[in-house]
Amino acid sequence: NPNPRPKPKPGTSANVVDTVAKDEAPSAVPGGEPPCPYPWEEGRPYTEGETVGFRGRMYACLGYPYTGWCGLDAAYSPGVGSQWTSAWEVVGDCTGGGTRQPTGKPTRRPTRRPVEPSPAGQGDAAAGALVNDKNTIRRVYDILDSKRDEIDGKLFLYQGSEPSTVYRYEGFIAGLKVMVEHQMAGLSYYLGDDSENGHLYGLVNIAAFIGQSMKETIQY
């Protein structure tokens, strides 16, 4: 599966961000906004276009390859999490305390503009941001490909002892390429510059990312 959906920790109770009582009836307001859907819940497997409501705003879960993050953890809580724009988009205003069942794709959902990466020497580089070197990107990919069996058999382990059946190298490298080559929420994954040891920065970034992922999801 090129895009395995993250699995919440077993036994983790849903973390409902909006604390408004579920039986509170939404009230109409001038302008005719629809009643808000249910609030976001941590660990819930959301689908593309599914909506949630929070503080008078309606949010829709983004499509592939971002869908798997929509219910992952509090960092992706719409409107408040540090990474919420990587998984959700605002699609309109709503009213009430979030008591209406989600209804799928909203009719007012705007078209999401693709984010084009800036060419080397322009855009982000002009602002002082780090820019990936194409040759370094290929070098990092080659190193990872050469370690594919070790990553699947010794790194992506369930409970630290047996290879995961959900998290595999194929899905990992596909997600990494999306982040490096196409960006997410206007940001790209840094794999290094054109210096002799530039690729080491990328490998360290990947090691840190995998370490965090092991702690939060892969081992489960």
Image: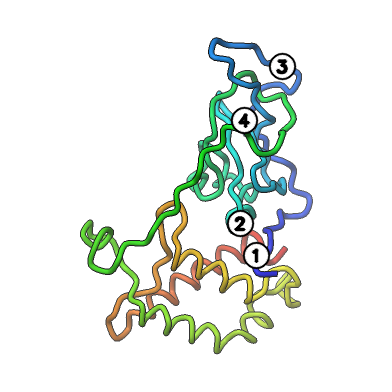
Residue 3, labelled with which disc?
1
**Pair 2/3: label in front:** 2
**Pair 2/4: label in front:** 2
Q: Are marks 2 and 3 in contact (CB under 8 Å)?
A: no
Query: Could you tell me which residue is drawn at 45 percent across and 48 percent down?
Result: 113
Residue 30 percent across, percent down from the top left = 54, 10
Helix, strand or loop at mark 3: loop
Q: Earlier in the sequence, mark 1 or mark 4?
A: 1
Q: Amino acid at mark 2?
A: Tyr
Count the marks.
Answer: 4
Q: Which residue is mark 3?
A: 24
Residue 62 percent across, percent down from the top left = 58, 48
**Pair 3/4: label in front:** 4
Label 2 to label 3: alpha-carbon separation = 34 Å
Q: Which residue is mark 2?
A: 64
**Pair 1/2: label in front:** 2
Q: Amino acid at mark 3?
A: Glu
Q: Earlier in the sequence, mark 3 or mark 4?
A: 3
Q: Name the image quarter holding residue 109.
A: top right
* Residue in the foreground of this view, choosing between 12 and 56: 56
Q: Which residue is mark 4?
A: 53
